[in-house]
């Protein structure tokens, strides 16, 4: 018998965290990780910005309004430090449950007072942090509170069953980012989505299906779509008036989580606005079948004509002689932010990161 990728059970969490409450959101995430593990899942995906919230209020409140600024400040106060006690709790939960966890966080650095990232944190079943993908370009209202991530977050970590990728919201429609996933042979792709889009945009549910089916077909991978939802208390906090509340209660506004096969079929979902955990069994050998015909990272492409180059992230804005010398490892205060090796703050060097990039010139290998 030849090589086989086997089968795994995957879970997608559609939930609302504890709005602008880091401790409450972590506590709820821990409970859901344990639930997914008890259901037999080997990988579980959470929505965008699950801890402590996503800045969805900017769909309704002006950037300089009192309520908008108040919630933006609360977002920073409750943002997550990767390698700190909150990610330690998530790592411990992943280890207890024995699952690979991908969870959306609003991230900040310690000892700072302003800059945040929209991040997707990967945690292994051993309770270590494997990767931290920061959204490269904030969208609409996110630009008021988030900055863009660097190339170090584009390198795919390796789970026991293969490469695992993650992109956040509109990144799943970015052709170059999608190809960076395809070129690194992702077998399972996590697509993290917010609670809802703007009232002036198409409903998120249809966008999720369009984008994820495209990624699944191009990459020969399974796509786990985790969308958020809202409870009544959060709707009351972010809505300006009854018209906003009515729109947030429309049938297709919230939710839409689902699991999509490499052929584009729905294996689970789409969910409505309810809180739920979707489960599906994934036959990973389907990826081999698909790529034997269309391997866009290999024989079904022309490297002599077309290629994608990933550039190294530039140095930080401020470097001083009293700081530690820059070596392969980056300090926790470094805004380039290489992922931590474990939940206790041990940092990963360039050599510790997953293969797939030539670290000398930044080209996909």
Image (cartoon, grey):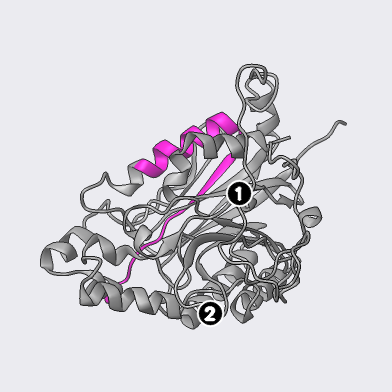
Secondary element type, mark 2: helix
Q: Where is residue 29 in the image (x, y as percent from the top left)?
A: 53, 72
Marks 1 and 2 sit apart, C-alpha to C-alpha, by 31 Å
Secondary element type, mark 1: helix
Left or right of 185? Residue 150 is left
Q: Position of residue 51 (x, y in %)?
A: 48, 71
Label 1–label 2 contact, CB within 8 A: no
Q: Which residue does the image show at 52% across and 68% down from the upper left? A: 107
Is 129 colored magenta in this rendering?
no
Q: Give the range drawn in magenta.
A: 207-233
Q: Which residue does the image show at 74% across and 35% down from the upper left? A: 365
Left or right of 365? Residue 134 is left
Q: In which quarter of the image is the N terminus?
A: top right
- Residue 137 tag number: none
Tell me how many marks there are: 2
Q: Where is residue 362 in the image (x, y as percent from the top left)?
A: 68, 41
Of the pair 107 and 286, the residue shown nearer to us: 107
Q: In which quarter of the image is residue 322?
A: bottom right
Is 229 colored magenta in this rendering?
yes
- Disc 2: which residue: 27
Q: Would you say residue 282 is visible in this rendering?
A: yes
Q: Classify 10 Å Cα crowding around label 2: few (below 14), some (14-19), many (20 and above).
A: some
Left or right of 37? Residue 198 is left
């Amino acid at each position: 018998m030849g090589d086989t990728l086997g089968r795994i059970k995957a879970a997608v969490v559609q939930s609302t965290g504890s709005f602008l409450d880091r401790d409450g959101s972590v506590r709820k995430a821990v409970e859901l990780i344990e639930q997914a593990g008890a259901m037999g899942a080997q990988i579980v995906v959470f929505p965008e910005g699950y801890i402590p919230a996503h800045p969805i209020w900017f769909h309704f409140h002006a950037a300089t309004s009192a309520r908008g600024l108040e919630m933006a400040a609360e977002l920073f106060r409750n943002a997550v430090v990767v390698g700190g006690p909150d990610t330690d709790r998530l790592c411990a939960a992943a280890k207890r449950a024995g699952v690979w966890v991908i969870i959306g966080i609003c991230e900040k650095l310690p000892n700072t007072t302003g800059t945040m990232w929209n991040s997707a944190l990967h945690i292994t079943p051993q309770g270590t942090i494997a990767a931290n993908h920061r959204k490269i370009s904030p969208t609409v209202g996110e630009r008021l509170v988030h900055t863009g991530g660097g190339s170090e977050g584009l390198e795919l970590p390796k789970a026991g069953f293969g490469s695992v990728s993650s992109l956040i919201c509109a990144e799943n429609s970015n052709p170059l980012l999608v190809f960076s996933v395809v070129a690194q042979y992702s077998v399972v792709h996590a697509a993290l989505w917010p609670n809802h889009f703007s009232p002036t945009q198409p409903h998120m549910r249809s966008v999720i299906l369009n984008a994820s089916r495209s990624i699944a077909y191009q990459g020969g991978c399974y796509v786990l779509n985790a969308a958020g939802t809202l409870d009544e208390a959060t709707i009351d906090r972010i809505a300006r008036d009854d018209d906003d509340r009515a729109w947030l209660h429309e049938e297709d506004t919230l939710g839409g989580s689902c699991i999509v096969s490499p052929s584009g079929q729905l294996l689970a979902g789409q969910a409505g606005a309810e809180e739920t955990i979707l489960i599906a069994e994934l036959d990973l050998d389907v990826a081999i079948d698909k790529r034997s015909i269309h391997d866009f990272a290999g024989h079904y492409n022309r490297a002599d004509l077309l290629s994608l180059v990933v550039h190294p992230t530039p140095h930080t804005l401020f470097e001083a002689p009293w700081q530690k010398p820059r070596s392969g490892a980056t300090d926790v205060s470094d805004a380039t932010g290489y992922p931590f090796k474990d939940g206790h703050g041990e940092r990963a060097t360039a050599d510790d990161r997953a293969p797939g990039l030539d670290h000398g010139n930044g080209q996909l290998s």
